[in-house]
Image: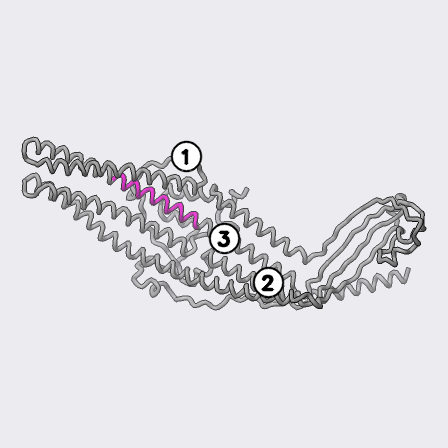
């Protein structure tokens, strides 16, 4: 009994020593440090022009689309975040990524399996007792049984295996899996951010088409009135038949534009419906002029350095870089011995009545070491691949930052230019409208021919259409700028972007 107690104490001492070695083991590979990135102090030089109030140190808010003060747009975006199938798929991928982290970290803990069995054994008469030991079998009743005997064997056992992460291979794998899961979450945020931008752009395009349809309808009414006037004047010899025909051409032209604009609006509505997860033809959006819904908000773009912490594509690229860095340490750990603790214990008996008695107990436990000697260059190739992968991810990360800076700078320039363009186009519309009135008065007095009236009307309608297009383009640029600066969401480990997305996962 004392000998068994001494053996147990020796085994415990060995295990404690192994655990101490494991806890103080050297984790292979470099720890991640963000690569140095050159960032400008502000956007002024990158934008190559005055930015007015577009740039500031303030950050966009979480529900940034509400700065457009349009309840319809807000409802469409919230519906899209809750019902869009791409967002739902992205949320499912996030859950899958988080599950992979649990799988990667499972190796840090002991793996324990319990099994039970009943076997009826019959030993060959033409064999020798104990032959199983000579052939490498584990000691047991069936090995030492007499030739020709038969008996029952009741067995209940627990198998233990625990790989001690002395060199940090499992921990580096867990670090890589965590970073890859974070990259998936950033991809989900990018999908949500793109979706918000697409919904906003589609909504503003529909409202632009509403305004163009309104302009075309006014043009049709105006030209029909003109046709009526010209026809009456021609009937009394005050206008030529050529003037009548020219006006009829313009009436037909205006009438032909309306169906095509309505077609474009229907197609854009179908796109908006799909973005919001609705079948085409199921959403009713009453016509409303773009000018009736337009709000030109000021956009706080923040500092250039803040893009590194906000844009999901940059954060995703950095997360993949972190994972690649951890994979280097994981690959280096394969060059070192693998140290494990294996054990088995349970109850074994040839009689069921004695199965659960103390004399039926058996166990074996001890460390095992596996040292790689020759693997045909596998470990070297694994390390080379990991280091090459890191270099690829480093280049992708730096390229993502450059593209982000360029995108924001381009949009700031575009918004500033369109602001100036809108001011000039509004002046153009005002002047063109006044010119139509003057031309009409002068025509009635016989001072000009009807071509001057038609030309003035054409100029006014073209100016109004261009103004609507520029207003929509500036709104589109604003949505794109919000997207370019990383949108607005709470970044404190909230998971997928919004409450609507979390409900979509249920």
Q: Where is residue 385 shown, x and y percent of the image?
A: 58, 64
Q: Is residue 128 above or below residue 435?
A: below
Residue at 55% from the left image edge and 42% from the top image edge: 506
Q: How many marks?
A: 3
Picture colour scheme: one colour
Closer to the camera in the image, 70 or 415:
415
Asked where in the image residue 42 lies, by quadrant, the reply is bottom left
**65 sits to left or right of 25:** left
* Mark toward the start of the polypeptide (1 vs 3): 3
Tell me the residue that label 2 is attached to. Answer: 327
Q: Where is residue 504 shown, x and y percent of the image?
A: 51, 42
Quarter occupied by the N terminus: bottom right
Write down the region rendered in magenta.
194-214
Q: Residue 282 carries which label?
A: 1
**Disc 2 to disc 3, C-alpha distance:** 21 Å
Asked where in the image residue 259 lies, by quadrant, the reply is top left
Tell me the residue that label 3 is attached to. Answer: 187
Q: Where is residue 337 shown, x and y percent of the image?
A: 71, 66
Residue at 56% from the left image edge and 58% from the top image edge: 179
- The answer to whether the residues at label 1 and label 3 have Cβ atoms under 8 Å apart is no
Tag 3's secondary structure? Answer: helix
**Disc 1 to disc 2, C-alpha distance:** 49 Å
């Amino acid at each position: 009994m004392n000998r068994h107690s001494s053996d147990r104490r020796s085994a415990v001492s060995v295990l404690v020593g192994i655990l101490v070695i494991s806890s103080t083991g050297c984790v292979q590979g470099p720890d991640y440090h963000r690569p140095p990135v050159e960032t400008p102090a502000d956007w002024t030089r990158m934008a190559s022009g005055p930015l007015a109030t577009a740039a500031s140190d303030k950050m966009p808010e979480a529900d940034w689309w509400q700065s457009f003060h349009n309840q319809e747009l807000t409802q469409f975006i919230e519906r899209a975040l809750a019902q869009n199938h791409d967002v739902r798929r992205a949320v499912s991928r996030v859950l899958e990524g988080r599950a992979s982290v649990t799988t990667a970290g499972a190796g840090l803990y002991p793996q324990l399996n319990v099994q039970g069995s009943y076997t009826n054994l019959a030993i060959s008469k033409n064999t020798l007792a104990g032959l199983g030991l000579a052939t490498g079998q584990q000691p047991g009743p069936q090995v030492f049984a007499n030739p020709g005997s038969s008996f029952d064997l009741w067995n209940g056992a627990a198998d233990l295996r625990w790989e001690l992460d002395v060199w940090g291979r499992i921990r580096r794998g867990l670090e890589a899996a965590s970073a890859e899961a974070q990259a998936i979450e950033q991809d989900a945020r990018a999908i949500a951010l793109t979706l918000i931008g697409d919904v906003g752009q589609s909504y503003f395009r529909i409202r632009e088409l509403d305004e163009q349809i309104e302009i075309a309808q006014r043009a049709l009414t105006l030209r029909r009135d003109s046709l009526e006037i010209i026809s009456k004047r021609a009937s009394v010899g005050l206008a030529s038949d050529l003037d009548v025909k020219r006006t009829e051409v313009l009436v037909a032209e205006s009438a032909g534009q309306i169906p095509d604009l309505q077609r474009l609006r229907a197609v854009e509505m179908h796109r908006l419906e799909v973005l919001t997860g609705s079948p085409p033809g199921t959403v009713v959006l009453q016509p409303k002029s773009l000018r009736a819904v337009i709000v030109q908000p000021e956009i706080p773009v923040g500092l250039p350095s803040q893009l590194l912490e906000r844009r999901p594509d940059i954060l995703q690229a950095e997360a993949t870089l972190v994972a690649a860095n951890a994979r280097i340490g994981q690959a280096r750990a394969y060059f070192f011995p693998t140290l494990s603790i294996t054990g088995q214990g349970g109850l074994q008996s040839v009689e069921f009545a004695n199965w659960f008695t103390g004399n039926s107990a058996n166990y074996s436990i001890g460390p095992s070491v596996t040292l790689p000697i020759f693997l045909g260059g596998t470990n070297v190739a694994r390390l080379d691949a990991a280091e090459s992968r890191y270099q690829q991810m480093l280049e992708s990360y730096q390229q993502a930052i450059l593209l982000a800076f360029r995108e924001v700078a381009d949009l700031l320039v575009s918004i500033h230019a369109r602001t100036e363009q809108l001011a000039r186009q509004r002046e153009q519309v005002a002047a063109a409208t006044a010119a139509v009135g003057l031309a009409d008065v002068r025509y009635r007095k016989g001072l000009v021919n009807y071509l001057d009236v038609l030309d003035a009307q054409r100029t006014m309608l073209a100016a109004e259409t261009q103004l609507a297009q520029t207003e929509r383009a500036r709104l589109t640029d604003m949505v794109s700028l919000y997207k370019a600066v990383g949108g607005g969401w709470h970044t404190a480990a909230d998971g997928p972007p919004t409450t609507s997305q979390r409900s979509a996962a249920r």
